[in-house]
Every structure is written in C-alpha cells, then in structure tokens.
Image (cartoon, rainbow, N blue to C red):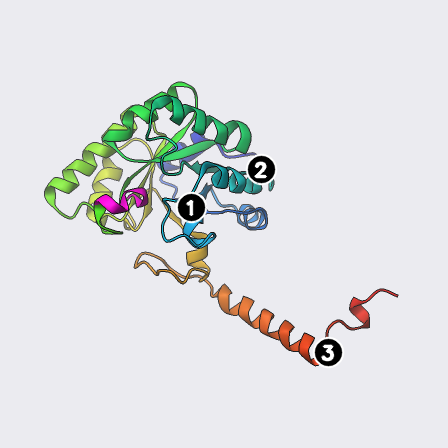
Amino acid sequence: MSRKKTILDIQKMKADGEKIAMLTCYDYPTARIMDSCGIDMILIGDSVGVVFSGYDNTLPVTMDEMLYHTKAVMRSNPKALVVSDMPFMSYQTDIRDARLNAGRFIKEGGAAAVKIEGGVNMAPVIKALVAIDIPVVAHIGLTPQSIHRMGGYKVQGKKIEQAESLMEDARAVEDAGAFAVVLEGIPQSLAQRITDSLNIPTIGIGAGSHCDGQVLVIHDILGLCEKYSPKFVKRYADVREIVADAVNAYILDVRQGNFPTEEHSFN
C-alpha cells in the first residue's frame, strides 16, 4: 500500500481476517527501516523509558520525552499508522488534561492516534478524546503503569472474577469509541473470548495467537534489552553481539594505529 494507513484500514484487516503487525519504535532510522518492511502500525511506547532511557519502569516517562520520540519517528514520514503512548499522569488527572496532552501528540507530534491504559475506569477519558476526533487505542490486562497495584508484571485474568472484569473492560473501551485494544499479559483463552466478542481489532502482547494482531518491543526482538526477557518475546536477531563486535574492532584499530588510513583522511 503506497498511501498512509488509517484506522479504517486497521479495522478492515480484522474484518478480512488479516493479521496486524505492530512494533514499538522511538527514532528516525528505525522507523525508516520498519516502514520499508511494511509494518502496519508503529507504537511510540512509553516502554522507551525502560529500553532506551534506562528507567526501572515506565512511570517516570514524561510528555516531553514522548513528544521528542514521536517527532523523531514522524520525520521518517511513515506510511504505517503511528500511535503514541500517553505517559503516566498525562490523562488520569482530569478530562481537560487528557484532551490537552492527547492533542499535543496529534498537533505537535504528528501521530495519528494515542494509546491509553485502563478499561472501565478510563472509558470516560476515551469517550472524551474520541468526541474531539482523537483516535484511541485502549490497553487492558497487564498495564505497566499499574505495576504497584498489580504487584509487578504479573499475568492478569487467570481467576474467573478477573477474567470477567477484563471482559467488562474490553466491552467498555469499545463502547467508549476505541478503534482497537491492546491485550497484554492475559491467558490466550481469555484473549480469544475477547477477540471474538469485539468488533474492534485486538492487538496481543503476551496474549496468545488468537488476537487480531501482535505487538512487541523492538529492542526485545533485536536482543538489545538486558533488563528482562518475558516469556512472550521471540528474539529475531542478536544485534547486541553485532554492535559489540563492531565496537571491539574499532577500539582495536584505533589502538593499533590501523584507523584512520589514507582512505579515511583528507589531503
């Protein structure tokens, strides 16, 4: 597809039974590579705080940081649908704050949509954003901004009452107007129930194969994150080793006087 993808394209993929491929991205060169490969959706995730900035979790990430990375990705002029994560406390305080901050991602950052963590409790926020034409991707299940309440990164929905609560969350975000929903860290049988019950696409991360699409963190699939290795991650390359080999070779060349040569020098 030569034109930019829209939320209608993403929703049609579910209707047509076509799987949706989504990855996180935080910078210009990576976005260019991803887009040239035909990725459907790019998420500027607040996971940038952990895998890029070195925080222990996503909670310290600010609006300014998220806008910086959103602008960097958008300079690649991607044809993929770009979604920016709303960081912790950028939308939970009140509707006005949520609208202003979400609007900044669209107006200043250039993103096409925002992502919000939460189900029934955040349905009014989703509805308020959709009402002013800001598309929203919802996010339920294991929500990283709720790690203190959840006691860490734990699978959600294993117990019957938790599963039913997540079903309610899924219906609530769809009713509020979200055009898609991320399902994170839930049993695959529950993810299948949710996927089958919704008209909007489900994007899974640690939610099994029955979702309408999948999302992973780019640093995880490239072997660039040493902080953790979730069960649901498949590593597609070990870029860390490639980078380390290049750096070691450079250090050796400099110390032995093999770089720079005449080829790399001006006369």
- Residue at mark 3: 257
- Which of the two labelled residues, at mark 3 and mark 2, occupies the earlier sequence position? 2
Q: CA distance from mark 1 to mark 2?
A: 17 Å
Q: Which residues are magenta?
A: 143-149
Element type at mark 2: loop
Q: Tell me: 267 left or right of 69.
A: right
Q: Tell me: 134 left or right of 34.
A: left
Label 2: few (<14), some (14–19) or many (≥20) C-alpha neighbours in 10 Å: few
Give, as a three-letter code, the residue at label 3: Gly
Q: CA distance from mark 3 to mark 1?
A: 46 Å
Residue closest to the eye, 243 or 104: 104
Label 1: few (<14), some (14–19) or many (≥20) C-alpha neighbours in 10 Å: some
Give, as a three-letter code, the residue at label 2: Ser
Give, as a three-letter code, the residue at label 1: Ala
- Which of the two labelled residues, at mark 1 and mark 2, occupies the earlier sequence position? 2
- The image shows residue 156 at horizontal and vertical percentages of 21, 47
- Residue 145 seen: yes
**Which residue is pictured at 18% across the width and 45% down the height?**
157
- Which of the two labelled residues, at mark 3 and mark 1, occupies the earlier sequence position? 1
Residue 190: within the magenta?
no
**Which residue is pictured at 42% across the width and 28% down the height?**
135
Image quadrant occupied by the C terminus: bottom right
- The image shows residue 30 at horizontal and vertical percentages of 55, 50
Front position among marks 3 and 2: 3
Q: Tell me: 37 left or right of 264.
A: left
- The image shows residue 168 at horizontal and vertical percentages of 19, 32
In contact (CB < 8 Å): disc 3 and disc 1:
no
- Residue at mark 2: 2
Magenta region's main secondary structure? helix
- Residue at mark 1: 21
